[in-house]
Image (tube, rainbow, N blue to C red):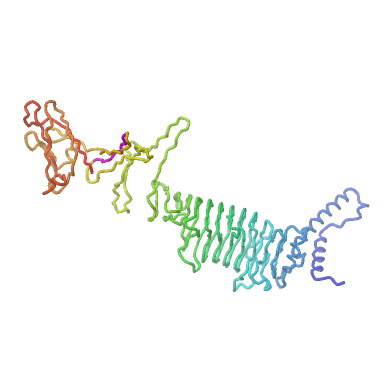
Amino acid sequence: MALSTDDRNRRRFMRRALALLPVAGMAGAMAAPERAQASESRERSDALDMTARNNVIYWGADPTGKRDSSAAFVKAARSSIVNSLYVPPGRYAIGQTVDLNGKNLIGPGRQRNKRETNAMLIPFHSLGNNAMFTGHGPVIRDLSFSNSEAKRKWEGIYIDSHGYNTVVENVHFSSANTAILVKEIMVNYSLLRCTFVGMRTGVKVEDRKKGNSTTARFVGNEFNYTDNAIIFDKDVYGATFQDNIFEALKGDAIRAGLIYRSSFIGNWWEGRNNGESPWPCVRTTKGQQFMDCFATSNTCVYGWTNVFASDKHSGSMGGVSLDGGEVVIRNSTGNALRLSPDSIRAEADAWKEATPLVIQSSRSEKTRQTNPIVLRHSGPGGDVVFDTDTESGNKGVWDGRLRFASQVGGDDKVLYDDYRVNRGRPGVVGETSLVDKKGTVRHALTGIPQFVKWRKGGDGPGCDFFARCEAVDKGKVEFSFPEGEVELRDPIITVTVDDAGIIHDGIEYLSAYSGSVKYQAWKGFRVRFVDRKSGQPTLPESFNLSIFYPG
């Protein structure tokens, strides 16, 4: 009976393999050393036989790529004595979808600039646009997938991949619709040191069961002239994207519905291939859901927006980013905290409502004490400065309030003592709240007044605040400004006299303008003194003024 071509190939393959083994004599006539040598020879023969049977050429695959080799791959995958399909150097045309039945698919590795030494898998015309391989084992590595008609992209899929506990390593994909399709979710899936050139989509995860992909790892891969690189139709949690290159892409480099608790380390984005520019290096399709992630050492140039180091926070990465030479802690919904070498700065996008910046001390459960908050200078001459961002239009002048929580009413409403700089007038003005026994909230004016020490002769601390500070009549001292220069609005003035026997006898206010009495607006005032015993006007040697401006 004539042997088939496949049988002849297998026999030739086995003869070449067995010719490498030492010739064994008759077992019964052998001495002990000879029997040991024979046993070793049999073990080597069995091992070589297993290696030979894993080789797809053993099953009739054509390494020239001229014939459809899919039947040989199917036979090998169905064989109970094959655990991994080994594809030696050559070109192998695949004309039907090969179910690998849980077997690994392994090649000889890839060499730079020596394509003839690679194991290249190409679509045969009978495959149409179907998947080339499905049902693979835990490992696919050291292979090349390419379209023989390089002038057009093949519309099929190279690997219909199993999403659980899979490693795809050192594999090259080019000129097709999709390199790797995962119909379910990714769990413990690693894509390592692979290259994608001229693909419509590199990796597509459909999440058909409406689950969440987790623990997917993409490390050291390169995507060139590919429309989309890594696409999750739904959500991904706990993924790692490290040391990948995305170059000359048209669409998305990394996209998902939601990205949560994932890491982006040392990736590189460069150039756009006729796609919209600028474009976010990572994008989510659910509104602003890009949360609790970590990023460092990523680079985006020539058309890519770095969502890790962006000054805008809506749609940017939420979590901790070390990109841009600063630490940015962001929630991706409008606000962030940025730590630079010389500042701790809270940031918010234009639409974001007011959000307080809270600096909170720790509390000792052992001693039941709250640890203090300390603003510490490196020397005794340091200042605490309150100012405003000059871009706010306030010329850097701080005009806010210091608020101290003071009382909690019966309805648990927090009340505050409010203090602010009395802009345009000296001192700090405030309001304090008090709740009486009936629960009524009562407010009192408080603050820091201006102080003046006047001595006979018109000198003393605080006197130079006024343009005129001098005795103008017997028993009278005037504190004033030229008309129209300064307006003192309804000040509260307290006078104490240092001299025994001389008492304060009232204040005369000087109108700032015609009709200013109605608004209690003054350009200054005169303080009167009299002798206690005689009642006659007289000047003390010195007296003190405290001047408080309600607002």
Q: Which residues are magenta?
A: 427-436
Q: Nearer the viewer, residue 5 or 431?
A: 431
Residue 275 screen position, x and y as percent: 49, 67
Residue 434 located left or right of residue 131: left
Residue 361 located left or right of residue 187: left
Q: Residue furthest front?
A: 438
**Quadrant position of the N terminus in the picture:** bottom right
Q: How many marks?
A: 0
Q: Nearer the viewer, residue 489 or 476?
A: 489
Instruction: Give the residue at x 55% y 58%.
Output: 234
Residue 72 falls inside the magenta stretch: no
Residue 429 screen position, x and y as percent: 26, 41
Residue 24 located left or right of residue 468: right
Q: Residue furthest right?
A: 29
Residue 529 screen position, x and y as percent: 10, 32
Q: Is residue 380 visible?
A: yes
Instruction: Give the residue at x 76% y 67%.
Output: 60
Main secondary-structure element of the magenta-colored stretch: strand
Q: Nearer the viewer, residue 532 or 159?
A: 532
User: Looking at the image, is 362 positioned above or below residue 388?
Assistant: above
**Quadrant position of the C terminus in the picture:** top left
Q: Which picture quadrant has residue 143?
A: bottom right
Residue 395 screen position, x and y as percent: 28, 51
Q: Is residue 192 visible?
A: no
